[in-house]
Image (cartoon, helix red, strand yellow):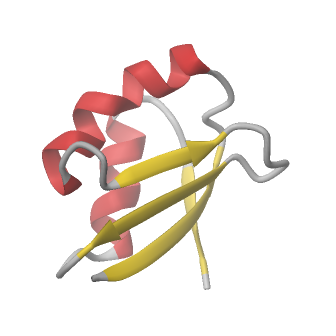
Amino acid sequence: METLKFKTNIKCSGCEAKVTPFLNDIVGEDNWAVDTQSPQKLLTIVADHLTADTVIKAVEASGFKAEAIK
């Protein structure tokens, strides 16, 4: 399993609810989490064979922004 991290603008539980179907579709339920208490609103994803671009596109499709952290 690979861990990917992203800086986002997902700031509350309502925002998380909007992005949930998009992230569940690409990585599955319970394979991602957003730390809304972090200043970077850190999205962490644990998955195999997933690119940062795929995650960014899914987050953007839900109306939010994501930037890969290396």
The C terminus lies in which quarter of the figure?
bottom right
- Relative placement, left or right, of 4 versus 38 is left
- Relative placement, left or right, of 4 versus 65 is left
- Image position, residue 4 (x, y; %): 45, 74
The N terminus lies in which quarter of the figure?
bottom left
Q: Is residue 19 above or below residue 53?
A: above
- Image position, residue 61 (x, y; %): 32, 37
- Image position, residue 54 (x, y; %): 27, 64
Residue furthest toward the top?
14
**Residue at x 40%, y 44% (from the top left corner):** 59
- Relative placement, left or right, of 23 versus 41 is left
Q: Is residue 51 above or below residue 36?
A: below
Residue furthest toward the right?
39
**Residue at x 30%, y 47% (from the top left corner):** 30
Q: Is residue 16 above or below residue 58?
A: above
Viewer-nearest residue: 37 or 70: 37
**Residue at x 41%, y 42% (from the top left corner):** 60
- Relative placement, left or right, of 53 versus 27 is right
- Image position, residue 57 (x, y; %): 33, 53
User: Looking at the image, how many numbered discs can be counted on the residues?
Assistant: 0
**Residue at x 21%, y 56% (from the top left corner):** 27
Viewer-nearest residue: 54 or 3: 3
Query: Image quarter for residue 25?
Result: top left
